[in-house]
Image (spheres, rainbow, N blue to C red):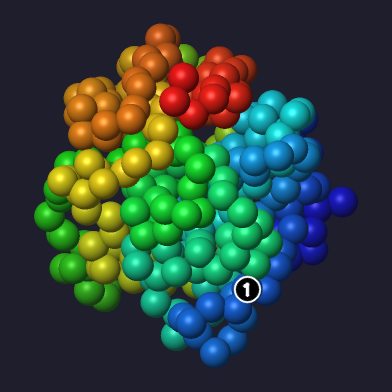
Amino acid sequence: MPASFLPKSIAQLTESTSIALAKSIQVEPITTPLNQQQIATTYARQGSGNTPILLLHGFDSSVFEFRRLLPLLAENNETWAVDLLGFGFTERAAGLPFSAMAIGTHLYYFWKTLISQPVILVGASMGGAAAIDFTLAHPEAVKKLVLIDSAGFAVTSNKGKFLIPPLGYLATSFLRNPKIRQKISVNAYCDETWASVDAQTCAALHLEMPNWNQALIAFTKSGGYGGFGEKLSQIQQQTLILWGKQDRILGTADAEKFQSAIANSQLIWIPDCGHVPHLEKPQITAQHILDFTSKVVGS
């Protein structure tokens, strides 16, 4: 049975991978310097193996983003997916900061508490930016890095700082609209049939969690993740860049820019695929990650 803290609408899931992931979601109170109180942090863990794989989801998303990829990786690897601070089903307690810096702090203490060994760090979209940030801040914790249609290259202006009430609540009400979310989902795929009712349910479950809108507004006002620019050259880890050839969300220009900026990196294009290869082409994406994971450093 799914955990009791998950929304009741979880009963509407129909895809087997979605249902299986719902049943595997756990919660752990994580002690951090961000708050005197522990943060109830949600995650999924499957499989076993030598080097753990840790999956980081994108903006306004959750661990459900990895419902198809996680079990494929977990067949022969210890694989984790975590809900980043301010997102998914992780607690959004009053008084917590919601910013890129806070996400990095929370992620470090999650890693230190439950994993505490170098990981293969996989970040998708905004999760790619979070993965880059974590790798730069804690290089000892990351054995290899995988970026999937990653944010974090271009420097963007902080328009979110103008999201003052009631504008912030209007913006989140806009994002809560099922028609808007479905349009975003359709645009995320090359093959629009993947934007199913089950996919829409998965993408909206976390909207029912307490303080979803307040946390999203606070994160946006903080500026979120900007571009890492010249800092990318500091990444020493072997890095795999996977990119959907038909990405309509971030486009494709940054893929080769990431490859040029990160010295020890390789870029693999995934054809007939949009912004979410881990959902649209999970078997191909998993195989690329597994091949990369097993590759001997320096070969």
Q: Estimate the x, y position of residue 293 in percent, counting from the top left.
A: 57, 28
Res. 218 in view: yes
Q: Looking at the rendering, which quadrant does residue 89 occupy?
A: bottom right
List the single residue furthest toward the front. 298
Residue at disc 1, secondary structure: strand
Q: Is residue 290 above or below residue 234?
A: above
Mark 1, other Cα within 10 Å: few <14 / some 14–19 / many ≥20: some
Q: Would you identify the image quadrant in which residue 183 lies?
A: top left
Left or right for 128, reference 47: left
Determine the residue positioned at 65% across, 57% down: 115
Number of numbered discs visible in the structure rendering: 1
Question: x, y percentage for residue 227?
Answer: 20, 48
Which residue is rendered at x = 15% and y = 59% of the image? Answer: 159
Closer-to-camera residue (191/240): 240
Residue type at the position of mark 1: Ile
- Residue located 68% across and 62% down the image: 114
Q: Which residue is label 1 attached to?
A: 30
Q: Is residue 190 visible?
A: no
